[in-house]
Structure formats: structure tokens, C-alpha cells
Image (spheres, rainbow, N blue to C red):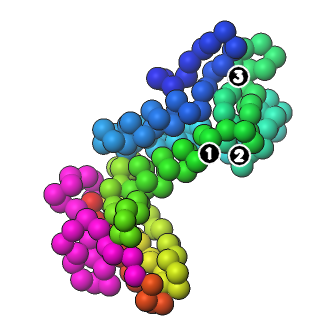
Amino acid sequence: MAFYIRQKMSQLQYTHAAIWVIIAEALLGFGEKAVKYFSMINPIEHSKTKDSVTKYKVEPYIIPADIYGQGNLAGRGGWTWYTGSSSWMYIAGIKYILGLNIENGYLCFNPCVSPNWKEYFIKYKYGKSIYNIKFINKNNNAENDKKIYLNGNIVKDNKIKLIDNSLVNNIEVEF
């Protein structure tokens, strides 16, 4: 994999670089790869068995800055509370894979997921308003073919103005 590198310090995974690869894959439209790589670096994936927990030795709910690859440190995570990788992982997952972005007071949608994901949901709270967002994957991923509905009405642009109207707003994004 492009983001598994070896350096003199016995590093197997440099998480910042791994996340930038995930973002690049999503930007290129390779949703299956982006999702696969995201899963690979997800801390919980390193903590599924007693043996993997013993090897990993760090919190399964915090992204490490790196994972070591040689000797008695192989598979061990490092620098969990000191890394900016966690914010980049959050951005990679929400913005680049799930496709939810907020720009200048608008919800914007550009999902890049695996073709196997037929639908998924996001609940977003803005002030006293709730935005229930349902993504429906029809496997065409073309920007021109995307259809967005707000409360049953088609939206002409790829964005919806955030309004604190104290209502539940239902959004469907077909792509």
C-alpha cells in the first residue's frame, strides 16, 4: 500500500500520510479504495481480538500518529494523544467519503463510497433544526446525475442553505 512506509525508526504506518492517501483516493473517485484504507487505519480494527489488543497497546478509540513495524514493537501504536491525525481522519470520513461538507452556511454533498454501500444516513443538528440526510447510492457517481431533495422538493444546486427553523428537514441525496 502506498501509505505503508518503512523508515529508520521502524515505522509501518505514518497516519497523516495514510489519511492523505485516503483523501486522494476519494478525490479521484475511488470510493472502494478510500473506504478500504479508512477501515485499515481505524483504531478499532487493531483491537478486535485479545492478541491484537496486546500487540497494539494503545486506546482503540483514538487514532495513533503511527504504528511501528519491526522487532518487539511491531503492530504497536504510538503518539495517540499528541497527533493531528485524528482531525484529518474525521475530515476524510465525513467530507471526502460520506460526502457531507459545510461551506459558507450551505450543506454540500459529494459522496465517494464503495459501490456496495446502497444507502446510509447522517443526522446533522444546526441550531434547533435537525437535518436527516439519506444518501442513496445508485452507483453512477457522476456529478451531473446527482439528485438532491429537501422535504420532497428537488434542489437545483448541489447545496442546501442551513436555516435554523426549529424544524426537522429531510434530505435525500441520490448519486
CA neighbours of label 1 inside 10 A, class few (<14), some (14 to 19), many (20+) = some
Seen at 30% across and 38% down, the residue is: 28
CA neighbours of label 3 inside 10 A, class few (<14), some (14 to 19), many (20+) = many
Picture coordinates of residue 56 (x, y %)?
77, 33
Q: Is residue 48 magenta?
A: no
Answer with left or right where residue 64 lies relative to residue 28: right
CA neighbours of label 2 inside 10 A, class few (<14), some (14 to 19), many (20+) = some
Report, in whole angstroms, how far the alpha carbon at label 1 lies from the one at label 2: 7 Å
Amino acid found under the numbered disc labelled 2: Ile
Looking at the picture, does residue 114 appear above or below residue 128?
Answer: above
Residue under pointer 2: 62
Looking at the picture, does residue 70 appear above or below residue 29?
Answer: above
Q: Are marks 1 and 2 in contact (CB under 8 Å)?
A: yes
Q: In which quarter of the image is residue 95?
A: bottom left
Residue under pointer 1: 86
Residue furthest to the top: 8
Picture coordinates of residue 88 (x, y %)?
54, 44
Q: Nearer the viewer, residue 143 or 35?
A: 143
| Residue 147 visible in this rendered orientation of the protein | no
Residue under pointer 3: 68
Answer with left or right where residue 61 lies relative to residue 95: right
Mark 1 or 2, which is nearer the eye?
A: 1
Seen at 24% across and 83% down, the residue is: 153
